[in-house]
Image (spheres, rainbow, N blue to C red):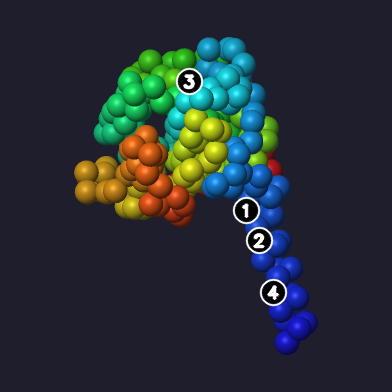
Amino acid sequence: MRKILFLAICAGLLVNMTVSGDPAVAAVGKNAPNFTLQGGDGKEHSLADYKGKFVVLEWTNPDCPFVHKFYDSGAMQKLQKEETDKGVVWLRINSSAKGKEGFQSPADVTAYVKENNVAATETLLDPSGKVGHEYGARTTPHMFVINPKGELIYAGGIDNKPSADAEDIASAQNYVQTALDEAMAGKPVTVATAKPYGCSVKYAN
């Protein structure tokens, strides 16, 4: 039995390493790992620059059907605008490696943002996948919410309807919006983690 248990644990670790790369550093209830990435504007942006504000991290891939679900319908842009109007910093992060589906250059990002009326604060590029692995980002979209103290208060799927059908958005519970509303009201976040869904992040390895 001990041998079987040992082999099962080893197999689990191998699966985890294959799917997620290096073990994630980010954990709900802990300080969110700082990072610095180039934005679509060509400038460097650090998470530390936004200390004292609520921050949303949205992992994205412009070619993913699940991302299309939210952007083609305008639902993601609507939520971005609603929250940034409240002072929330919304950072989209693209961890697609060069040569992989969804990879974007700064010029690509600029064009995409304009064409799709993106209302996020900035889109950041993580082609090495370093930041994505630190946060354990597995899907697009995969969402994270950070409070003004720099603590991660939500991590997971954007809502409770794991489909690529835009018609499901209206009836879904948006976990990101709920987490922000509760935290801004000084209440505990009732759903702090949820299973992410969407396309796998197209990491270099």
**Pointer 4 and pointer 3: residues touching (CB < 8 Å)?**
no
- Which residue carries the number 4 mark? 8
- Which residue carries the number 3 mark? 122
- Which residue carries the number 2 mark? 15
Amino acid tagged 2: Val
Tell me which numbered mark, 3 or 2, is placed earlier along the sequence: 2
**Pointer 3 and pointer 2: residues touching (CB < 8 Å)?**
no
Tell me which numbered mark, 1 or 3, is placed earlier along the sequence: 1
Tell me which numbered mark, 1 or 4, is placed earlier along the sequence: 4
Amino acid tagged 4: Ala
Q: For the point 53% across and 41% down, which residue is it?
A: 152
Q: Give the Cα separation between the discs numbered 1 and 2.
A: 6 Å
- Callout 1: SS: helix
Quadrant assignment, res 9: bottom right
Residue situated in front as seen by the camera: 139 or 159: 159
Q: For the point 50% across and 36% down, which residue is it?
A: 146
Work out whether residue 142 can be spotted: no
Q: Give the Cα separation between the discs numbered 3 and 2.
A: 33 Å
**Residue 80 pos. (x, y %):** 35, 27
Instruction: Residue lying at the far bottom in this picture: please name it.
Output: 1
**Pointer 1 and pointer 2: residues touching (CB < 8 Å)?**
yes
**Is residue 89 depicted above or below 176 in this figure?**
above
Quadrant assignment, res 181: top left
Give the class, few, some or many, for how many residues have Cα within 10 Å of label 3's Cα (few <14, many ≥20).
many
**Pointer 1 and pointer 3: residues touching (CB < 8 Å)?**
no
- Which residue carries the number 1 mark? 19
- Callout 3: SS: strand
Quadrant, the C terminus: top right
